[in-house]
Amino acid sequence: MSNLQVNEKINTKGKTQQKVQGFGRFLSGMILPNIGAFIAWGLITALFIPTGWLPNANFAKVVGPMINFLLPLLIGFTGGKMVAGARGGVVGAIATIGIIVGADIPMFMGAMIMGPLGGYVIKKFDKVIDGKVPAGFEMLINNYSEGILGAILALIAFSGIGPVVLGLNGLMKDGVQAIVNAGLLPLASIFIEPAKILFLNNAIGNGILVPIGAQEAKAVGKSIFFLLESNPGPGLGILVAYWMFAKGAVKESAPGAIIIHFLGGIHEIYFPYVLMNPLLIIAVICGGASGIFTFQIFGAGLIAAASPGSIIAVLAMTPKGGYFGIIAGVLVAAVVSFLISSVIIKASNKKTNGDTNGNELEEAKEKVNAIKGVKVKTFNKIIFACDAGMGSSAMGATTLKNKFKKAGFDINVVHCAINEIPTDAEIVITHETLADRAKSRAPKAEIITIKNFINSPEYDKLVNRLL
């Protein structure tokens, strides 16, 4: 193979990797801004459902509408907004309601399809009519285009996409049943864990595993089937890995999610964290399978279903003398899930090579400009951008504002999501892994890449430049 062919192969692999990473970040951008809503739902669920810690039938009425309507609509709106701003968000939310009503399970994946699709459709429509709208008719056309296109997409979602997701639900259930019938219990995680991430955990658990477990428990006094879906170990490993190795808002939200998941028993709280990085499905599958295998080795089982899937509820349903096997299975699942998740999360945070040489080159260029007397351009506004436009960029913007203030500069520093960078931006600061996306969003802007939003040498370089 020639050097040219090798280089072409490497470039193709690099482009593919960038596309996969970009897709993962796009999914993350829909979930991350709404983590607070997931936590709110998890708290209410853990406290007030009939099997919760403070059962309250009145407050529990909030649980269903939140997971069935509020959370998918927030995701749909966010996905549409990422594509086409506020108008895209509105159309994305309208389209999402169609898929919500067309199914009897929480439509999170459906929302992640319909939201961006709604944004894409309205964006294309706006491009077609650009410059063709008579003066004075702008608001009329904008409002009715949102309503008409949103209504059409909602009907398409209701009649077409919803049934597809429901068919997937049936496929997952059939797969679990086939593996159970074949006696290959650890392999059941191949279906159970992805089904959980699609919020089909209740369908799998209550629809298949609990009835089988009840029959076995009646005959022998305990059943491993009560542990296949309710084991909190795989989710715990995911959340601990995020807590230890992630960055920004997702890292800060992980400890609260750990409490809600492991002690509160609400597994749904960790599903969005997997959706943010779909490769993590490997971690939960391996964690679930290793946990089931450990349960089999020790002959572990529960006397009844653990609801909710809290470690406390699991231990409460453990027969006398069976605690060691139960705890071992949960810990093994958590450790395996954590180890694999750590590798995946670290890989997503991996720094590019050759940074030192790149920094030295930039410093050399600045010195040459100074020697030649080249006038350095100043800016009235600087954009900080990160994936979601929340934690990392906000902290970086505050840090740079303080440095500008000390230097006597009156420069406006704003933070935003990478997909919301103004196209006319003059200078954009972002993490080095997001540089290509920033450049595509603002091709005329100067892109300054950093490794650390809080403490980066690039801040001082910029201040010295402007001095």
Image (tube, rainbow, N blue to C red):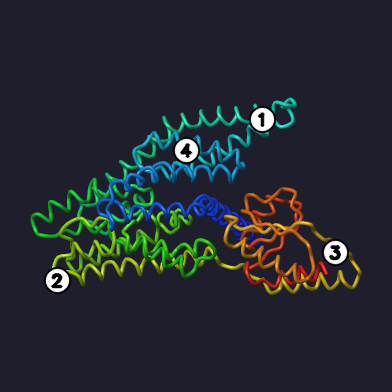
The picture places residue 127, in percent across and down from the top left corner, at 68, 34
Q: Amino acid at mark 1?
A: Met
* Along the line of sight, the residue nearer the viewer: 225 or 133: 133
Q: Amino acid at mark 4?
A: Thr
CB within 8 Å, label 1 to label 2: no
As drawn, is 271 to the left or to the right of 131? Answer: left
Q: Alpha-carbon neighbours of circle 3 within 10 Å: few (<14), some, or many (≥20)?
A: few
* Location of mark 1 (residue): 139
Q: Secondary structure at mark 4?
A: helix
Q: Secondary structure at mark 3?
A: loop
- Say whether disc 2 or disc 3 marks the residue closer to the N-terminus: 2
What label does residue 7 carry, if any?
none
* Along the line of sight, the residue nearer the viewer: 74 or 62: 62
In the image, residue 380 sits, relative to residue 58, either above or below, namely: below
Q: Alpha-carbon neighbours of circle 1 within 10 Å: few (<14), some, or many (≥20)?
A: few
CB within 8 Å, label 4 to label 3: no
Q: Amino acid at mark 3?
A: Val
* Location of mark 2 (residue): 321
As drawn, is 430 to the left or to the right of 424? Answer: left
In the image, residue 404 sits, relative to residue 138, either above or below, namely: below
Instruction: Report the residue at 25% width, 55% height from top.
Output: 307
Q: Nearer the viewer, mark 1 or mark 2?
A: 1
Q: Count the marks: how many?
A: 4
* Location of mark 4 (residue): 96
Between the C-alphas of marks 1 and 2, the distance is 71 Å
Instruction: Report the residue at 47% width, 64% height from top.
Output: 344
- Location of the C terminus (image quadrant): bottom right
The picture places residue 396, in percent across and down from the top left corner, at 64, 65
- Say whether disc 4 or disc 3 marks the residue closer to the N-terminus: 4
Between the C-alphas of marks 4 and 2, the distance is 49 Å
* Location of mark 3 (residue): 376
